[in-house]
Image: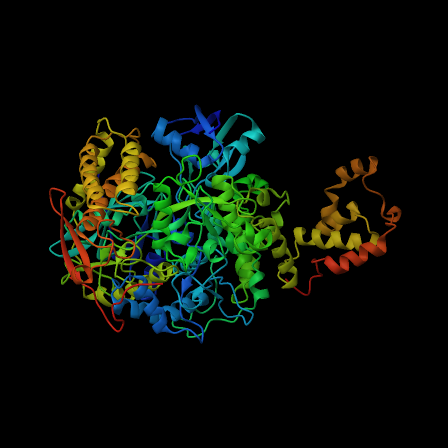
Amino acid sequence: MSLEIKKYDVVIVGAGLAGLAAARELQVAGKNVAVITKLHPLRSHSGAAQGGINAALSEEDSIELHEFDTVKGSDYLADQDAVNLMCSKAPETIRWAEHMGAAFSRTEQGTIAQRPFGGQSKPRACYAKDRTGLTLLQTIYEQMHRENVKVYDEWYCMDLLYEDGKVNGVVAYDIKSTQTAIFNAKAVMFATGGYGRAFSVNSNAHANTGDALSIVARHGLPLEDMEFVQFHPTGLAGSGVLISEAARGEGGRLYNSEGERFMERYAKEKMELAPRDVVSRAITTEIREGRGVGPNKDAVAIDLTHLGEEIIMERLPELRDLAITFLGQDMIKEPIHIAATAHYSMGGIPCNIDGQVQKSPTELVEGFYAAGECSCVSVHGANRLGANSVLEALFFGRHVGKAIARDVDGLGFKDATEQNAQKALAQLETLLTNNGSERVPELRNELQESMTFDAGVFRTRETLLRQKEKIAELKRRYKDIRIDDKSKVYNTDLQEAIELGHLIDFSSFIVEGALAREESRGAHYREDFPTRNDEKFLQHTFGYMKEDGSIELEYADVVLGKFEVKERTY
Amino acid sequence: MKTQTITFNVFRFNAETDYLPYYKNYELEVGQDDLVLDILNRIKWEQDGTFSYRRSCRHGICGSCAIKVNDKPVLSCKVNVLELVEQFGTELTIDPQDKSRAIKDMVIDKKNFWEKYDAVKPYLIADVEEHPDKENIVSKDEAEQLLEADYCIQCGSCVYACSALGVNEDYLGPAAFAKAYRFNADVRDEAKIERLEIVDELGSGVWDCVKCNECAEACPKEVNPIEKITKLHNQLFAENVAAKNVASKHAVGFKHSMEKHGLLDEGELVRYSEGNLGVMKHIPEAITMFRKGKIVLPWNMPKSKNLDEVKKLIKSSSTVEEYKGSK
């Protein structure tokens, strides 16, 4: 079987907001660019963002205030130069999307409407009803499509061509035929999204398996701050499907099985409107101490009935619909059952402010870029604020696209050979022919459940050590898997097996990072070290996977700036 | 929790190995919160890993998982199984959106869907200001004109339920027209006429809609494509793009008849739509219809008692206009 080698200036993996925005910039700049996605671009998870996208547009708001809120929200772990760049470019970014067709909700004056969001000092979240991500994804896709960018949809990226400090392309296969090809390029950009699927209860799409992270890690390249995973307080019981922050914003009240409005004990002043990490911990504590509701006692109740039908139908219609679909609970008539759900990945592939991927805290990889949720610039530090994620994806996607357009002519093109695909081909062959006794869905369940239980909202040395062992066990058992589907046509069994390998590999970074970080900061909470320790841990974690699968850690300085590091109180 | 035993009769086909598709039965215990996607997952994860389907977001926003259950278009992650059981009984048949396009089980080749999407210039056409310091001012009323057409998630439910498409492959179909309307209704767009010329084409354009309403029924996001198709009809007349052809003349003739008689003059309508020569070929049907009293001779055409009311109604609501010197 001869292997096709396709040649481009730039190959982008992932077709959400970040990947598509970069692709459009490169195409407009006259570069020969292709986008690879395992879905169709319009199926990307950027489209699921509900609430909004931040920009200091109004007279009473300011860029500096947006920066401050972001840095404070990050528990001071965000790099302030990156935050400054993103916040100062936010108004232009949003207006650019508007000029390209985004269907924002409007004020009486016809300008872009904005709403308040958690942790923001001003109403700053520009929105399109409760489907902001959808209109942005459609718009960027449409305008990229208008520029005739080449998209390989339903292609699965398996490996990175990385040699002597330079990236020369990727290996991918066509899901429809399992036909493998090399995409040989001067530069590669990863924009593959988050890693929430490592947890059993999560708000993420099935596709969010963090593929790029493990692909990168297997080449010995670092991952940064992986222990920071945001748990959103209001996921629907069981499924974890997101009920937007708007539910609390509009006045939702949380109750346990004893009918107690328990937030009084955790955040007497802010009550339900305390930050996401605080509310998530409160909910999880109630459940752990046996005061949960529902058939499995694995949830608490959020009551919105006092708002009345009119307000619910006007402001929360989509949320009502979701609760009916998933739980058969109508929030107009009864409280609905929710629990904390793994939602957003703050960590990822370390990169500098132009999206250039780092080989270490001080060195860069040549010809390799990343943006969006799979990257760690870092603008979110230890905890992301609502409505900053779509901003990051859209702004940095575009910014990194421009950076590549600027750099690419100076990057060498190294011709790939079929040999470069051997590792990927061997992996495919093994998975297709392995005749072991383990099954993918079972291993995946065990990983997700144990990650939620032992490396989730609450962590201790004991639970993390247990999880470290569990991952080692799963790695061993993974070698003994058998898939049912041996065919070459749209083999999702095969794809799920590859994805499971990715989930296991990057999960070990989450656990090792969390184990070593003996403090509590933002979304990372150690019961045995409940306070923040700036002296020791005002630092980014860099993890490297060794040949034997073990993880080695080092730390890098946070880029501080005009905002003094203070205690984070609300 | 109470469960019910349901038999799922599932379409299976692998283009690589199967000459013909077949159905395979899976029995599952279904709980009250189970969605169709949960069933697809359980078949794959618990019983048969070769079973294939598309899915991603699992909460009704990415549009991947649309299939058919007992011929009803269903976005798997949005539809409760026991509600389908209530409608169809305890045996459910699971099919891909279009069996003739199946590649593997529920996975179909959607090339035709995306080609139709591409055909309507599905993007805002205006000069993109790359570094704007102001947004366009769009009033709330103007923004509302999109009529939620921007809510379409391209799941294809309407397209693979469309009766017109079933008999005419060239027809662009409800999703593409909803998209065309989405941009034509946008005050920022500058290519309305170009898009209208596309949707005016006989065969592929909006005139081939048979108004069966299946698209509106099928849509999981309540985009109501047929409403957008009607709006495009209106725009075709309002912008003088409607070519003088059998379809648009049919619409105008219909209005004429109603204005004149308050009733439909079937014979005159045919003459109006197809011209004096065109009408000749319908003479055999006309004779049959005349015998059954379905049409009358022109001088015997009665008038509605409520002709004045009908005229008022036409005045207030008709979107069909005379051709104003169009092509």
**Image side of residue A168 versus residue B114, left or right:** left
Q: How is the image coloured?
A: rainbow
Q: Is residue B14 visible?
A: no
Question: Which image quarter is the C terminus of chain A in?
Answer: bottom left
Report how many numbered discs are placed on residues in the image: 0
Look at the picture and state if B167 lies above or below A516: above
User: Which residue is found at the position 81% from the left and 57% from the top?
Assistant: B311
Look at the picture and state if B138 lies above or below A475: below
Question: Which image quarter is the N terminus of chain A in?
Answer: top left
Closer-to-camera residue (A157/A245): A245
Closer-to-camera residue (B165/B319): B319
Closer-to-camera residue (B183/A287): A287
User: Which residue is found at the position 31% from the left and 30% from the top?
Assistant: A485
Place of residue A56 in the rendered image (x, y in percent of width and height, measured from the top left): 40, 70
Place of residue A429 in the rendered image (x, y in percent of width and height, measured from the top left): 21, 34
Place of residue B308 in the rendered image (x, y in percent of width and height, measured from the top left): 85, 56
User: Which residue is found at the position 50% from the left and 57% from the top?
Assistant: A250
Closer-to-camera residue (A207/A266): A266
Q: Is residue B276 visible?
A: yes
Place of residue B39 in the rendered image (x, y in percent of width and height, measured from the top left): 43, 32
